[in-house]
């Protein structure tokens, strides 16, 4: 369960940033007064154009950034007060994420299992299951730098899921991936839902929205424009395609 | 702290697989002293031997004077003596290197010697590094002739040679060879150690923070339950260790260099081997450890601030100068370890190392050096952890 309650995030702007953005105020509201809830066994989609505040929101959920105001609770723990416990419950994957090129999949998975404080026996069982499922065994001893993009993606998935997280956060997970490797991610997100995990994923790709969403929130310029089930979104839409509806809601036309 | 250790272990593995780091941390420090020593000894001795063996082209114009001097020159196998010199063009002949040296005696040379006056001898040559030793050889012959002339005159007056040497100077330098060596080489050796300490720590520092940002692995690391302090400690230990290893390897390289050369005079070798004794090395290392801690904390802080590998490098390259400068001041003569200099980081290590090598280090000052270094190391580590906790530093630029 993820409960985001009236969360805002302001970034201080440097002189250079102010000039670049053509603004005079000293801070920029990346996210303002956003509230939503992601439930277990459902996929929550955060849809928005670039710079809408998706990454900032997901970084606050995964405790990397602290909200300026408001609060976030993950599996019952506060992201600021109990950030370590929250991180133990979360699996985090972004499209930009890379792996340590000089280590092998075996070493990387072991490293993260250690950081998640996993018990040795549990780790071994879990690793075996994931490596079998993702077909990693064949290249488990090769350096990451020597692997193909698809193989790396599989290792990233294993890395995200090794500690069997209750909540999984995907920040534009398919960015820069080809159709086949994107497919692995889509499959992963679906299997998380089947396992009863709470899933939040951000995207700006409409195809993914229709493929995956149970619940949908649309964010633009830091503000939430829509927040309901995907079913309701489809039922209420006033235009023909979901893309048109998205544009209409942004008010950009 | 188990998680800090997990991070430490992973970073060590990662670092040791990086070719760039291995070259900077192990290969260069290991080779630099043996190479420098070999090069200096080899080039030095071969140049010297060349200059000594070179056959000098000497023009000798005696105009019938100084038969004994002429004999001395003609006896020499290492010189070709030409007595047919065009007197009008002596300078041109020397300029054009037809002769290395031309010696001209005045026509009235013998007559003036006989009259107890000074005979005129002109020596023409061009100064150059290879002529330096040649000139010494020429002057040796001339001086020996002059001594004969002086002895002859003195004996004509029934005087002993002590008549013209009323002062007998005996030089008693009581400083030991080790002290002298400490004074000279003692300055530049620690200079190298300090630089290796810094260079060895630099690449791992860049790789472990800015590199992690650039490769976008830092987010996944920050998303784990490891605390920022644990992350910093794990990384920081690796960077510190890299600096220490680098410096220690350079000391080992020095040891190897000393062992493999046979051209070093036995006396100096004794002194160097004295320095390479374990007590001195242990003391030197004990200074380098807090210095490495300081370097590691500063480098890691800068590295986490930088957005990319490149930016980190461009921030740190000028730092090299900041490190080299105080280390270089330590080489200058006259600057001593005292209550003030013992507080100045890097310089104090340089000066204290010099005194350790010379065997003259005072405990009080050594403790002050430690205190200064540990204080600084602590402060820089504190800032390093603080920076890792700041969102705007970690996510600077995105």
Image (cartoon, rainbow, N blue to C red):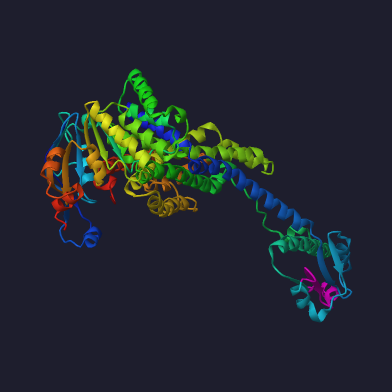
Position of residue A50 relative to residue B250, above or below, is below
The image position of residue A66, as x and y in percent, is 19, 41
Query: Considering depth in this image, is B190 or B234 the residue closer to the camera?
Result: B234
Note whether residue B66 is visible.
yes
Query: Considering depth in this image, is A239 or B147 the residue closer to the camera?
Result: A239
Note whether residue A89 is visible.
no
Q: Does the magenta segment cover residue B110?
A: yes
Query: Considering depth in this image, is A135 or B353 the residue closer to the camera?
Result: A135
Image point (36%, 32%), residue name: B7
Find the magenta span and give its range: B97-120
The image position of residue B201, as x and y in percent, is 43, 42
Position of residue B58 relative to residue B170, above or below, is below
Position of residue B305 relative to residue A119, above or below, is below
Q: Is residue A80 left or right of residue B109?
A: left
In the orientation shown, which residue stands out farthest toward the front?
A240
Image point (67%, 43%), residue name: B265
Image point (81%, 81%), residue name: B88
- Image quarter hosting the N terminus of chain A: top left
In the orientation shown, which residue stands out farthest toward the bottom?
B88
Query: Considering depth in this image, is A227 or B85 the residue closer to the camera?
Result: A227
Q: Is residue B365 left or right of residue A248?
A: right
Q: Does the magenta segment cover residue A35?
A: no
The image position of residue B330, as x and y in percent, is 46, 50
Residue A26 placement: quadrant? bottom left
Q: Is residue A253 left or right of residue A181?
A: left
The image position of residue B258, as x and y in percent, is 62, 40
């Amino acid at each position: 369960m993820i409960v985001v309650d009236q969360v805002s995030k302001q970034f201080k702007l440097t002189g250079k940033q102010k000039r670049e953005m053509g603004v005079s105020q000293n801070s920029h509201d990346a996210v303002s007064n956003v509230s939503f809830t992601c439930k277990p066994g459902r996929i929550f989609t955060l849809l928005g154009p670039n710079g809408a505040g998706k990454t900032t929101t997901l970084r606050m959920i995964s405790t990397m950034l602290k909200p300026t105001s408001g609060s976030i609770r993950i599996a019952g723990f506060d992201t600021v007060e109990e950030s370590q416990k929250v991180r133990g419950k979360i699996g985090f994957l972004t499209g930009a994420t890379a792996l340590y090129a000089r280590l092998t999949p075996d070493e990387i998975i072991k490293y993260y299992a250690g950081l998640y404080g996993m018990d040795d026996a549990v780790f071994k069982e879990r690793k075996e299951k994931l490596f079998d499922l993702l077909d990693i065994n064949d290249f488990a001893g090769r350096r990451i730098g020597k692997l193909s993009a698809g193989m790396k993606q599989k290792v990233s998935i294993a890395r995200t899921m090794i500690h069997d997280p209750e909540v999984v956060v995907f920040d534009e997970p398919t960015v820069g991936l080809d159709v086949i490797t994107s497919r692995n991610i889509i499959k992963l997100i679906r299997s998380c839902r089947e396992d009863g995990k709470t899933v939040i994923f951000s995207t700006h790709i409409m195809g993914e929205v229709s493929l995956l969403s149970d619940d949908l929130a649309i964010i633009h310029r830091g503000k939430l424009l829509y927040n309901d089930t995907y079913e309701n979104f489809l039922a209420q839409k006033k235009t023909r395609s979901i893309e048109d509806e998205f544009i209409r809601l942004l008010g950009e036309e | 702290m188990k998680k800090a250790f997990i991070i430490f272990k992973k970073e060590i593995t990662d670092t040791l697989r990086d070719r760039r780091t291995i070259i900077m941390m192990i290969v260069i420090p290991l080779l630099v002293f043996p190479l420098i020593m070999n090069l200096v000894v080899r080039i030095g001795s071969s140049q010297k031997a060349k200059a000594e063996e070179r056959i000098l082209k000497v023009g000798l114009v005696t105009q019938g004077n100084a038969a004994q001097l002429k004999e001395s020159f003609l006896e020499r196998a290492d010189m070709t003596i030409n007595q047919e010199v065009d007197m009008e063009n002596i300078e041109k002949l020397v300029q054009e290197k037809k002769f290395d040296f031309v010696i001209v005696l005045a026509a009235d040379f013998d007559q003036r010697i006989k009259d107890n006056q000074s005979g005129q001898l002109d020596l023409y040559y061009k100064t150059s590094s290879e002529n330096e030793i040649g000139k010494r050889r020429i002057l040796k012959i001339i001086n020996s002739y002059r001594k004969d002339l002086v002895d002859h005159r003195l004996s004509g007056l029934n005087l002993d040679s002590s008549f013209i040497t009323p002062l007998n100077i005996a030089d008693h330098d009581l400083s030991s060879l080790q002290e002298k060596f400490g004074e000279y080489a003692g300055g530049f050796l620690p200079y190298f150690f300090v630089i290796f300490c810094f260079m060895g720590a630099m690449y791992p520092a860049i790789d472990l923070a800015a590199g992690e940002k650039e490769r976008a692995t830092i987010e996944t690391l920050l998303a784990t339950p490891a605390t920022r302090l644990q992350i910093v400690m794990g990384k920081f230990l690796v960077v510190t260790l890299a600096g220490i290893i680098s410096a220690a390897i350079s000391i080992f390289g020095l040891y190897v260099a000393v062992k493999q050369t046979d051209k070093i005079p036995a006396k100096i070798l004794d002194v160097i081997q004295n320095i390479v004794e374990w007590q001195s090395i242990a003391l030197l290392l004990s200074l380098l450890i807090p210095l490495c801690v300081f370097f590691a904390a500063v480098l890691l802080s800068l590295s986490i601030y930088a957005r990319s590998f490149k930016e980190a490098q461009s921030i740190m390259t000028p730092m090299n100068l900041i490190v080299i400068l105080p280390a270089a001041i330590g080489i200058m003569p006259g600057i001593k370890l005292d209550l003030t200099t013992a507080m100045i980081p890097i310089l104090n290590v340089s000066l204290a190392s010099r005194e350790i090598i010379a065997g003259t280090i005072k405990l009080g000052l050594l403790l002050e050096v430690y205190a200064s270094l540990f204080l600084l190391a602590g402060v820089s580590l504190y800032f390093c952890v603080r920076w890792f906790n700041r969102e705007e530093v970690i996510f600077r630029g995105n």
